[in-house]
Image (cartoon, rainbow, N blue to C red):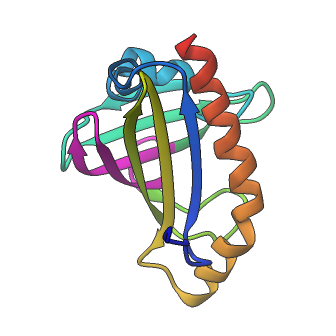
Amino acid sequence: MSERPSKSEFRISRRFAQPLARVWQAWSTAEQFQMWWGPKGCRIDLRHFELRPGGFVHYAMNFPQGPAMWGRFAIREVVPRERLVWLNSFSNERCGIARAPFSERCPLEIQNTATFVEEDRATVLTLRAQPFGELDDERAYFEELQPSMNEGYGGTLDALEAHLK
């Protein structure tokens, strides 16, 4: 029987035709990561990339219209070619945690877990996200936001797929 996520957990999976080593490289090197990460239509300006427990990834999301939005990963766990765990949040230019520009109810931090499994020279990536340290109202907002997250993460994984080709 497969494990079903709770309402407070978002989950998306994608199968990539490339081997695990290639997919892992796209996630674990700054030069490649900045070429595909982020919402559709944005360009990433990577300011810091330290993929190790206790490290940070800090970036600006630049859109054709409007000011840059800042984001950060606080890296919690790295198991090469198996798993990445990070706390994702909006940030300011100095890598401090900031509220989402679109809602005061959005959790300040969301824990993401990406798992990588090689099957027949292809790679299955599963991304799970859930609020971290949230208040009840923030958890409710996260649950309401999941259809939008499916579109956003789906677009990001589309960009990864295009990058891998």
Residue shown at 55% from the left, 70% from the top: 9
Which quadrant holds the C terminus? top right
Report the front residue among 8 and 18.
18
Instruction: Give 147 or 107, whichever is nearer the viewer.
Output: 147
Q: Quadrant of residue 46?
A: top left
Residue 67 lies, in percent from the top left, at 70, 36
Magenta stretch holds residue 158: no
Residue 53 pos. (x, y %)? 18, 48
> Where 159 falls versus 112 (above or below)?
above
Which residue is at a point 19% across and 40% down the rendered structure image?
A: 52
Name the side, left or right, on which 11 lies relative to 80: right
Q: Is residue 113 above or below residue 67?
A: below
Part of the protein shown in magenta: 71-96
Give residue 107's position: percent from left, percent from top: 55, 70
The number of numbered badges drawn on the structure is 0
Task: Looking at this view, name the residue that lies furthest to the bottom.
Answer: 136
Q: Quadrant of residue 22?
A: top left
Is residue 91 visible to us here?
no
Q: Is residue 94 magenta?
A: yes
Tell me if I can see residue 158 in this picture.
yes
x 54%, y 21%: residue = 17
Outermost residue to the right: 65
Q: Residue at x 42, y 32 (%)?
A: 119
Give the x, y percent position of residue 160. 57, 25
Q: Nearer the viewer, residue 93 or 17?
A: 17
Above or below — where is 82 with respect to 101? above
Q: Along the horizontal axis of the image, is 31 left or right of 68?
A: left
Q: Residue furthest top?
A: 165
Main SS, magenta region, reads: strand
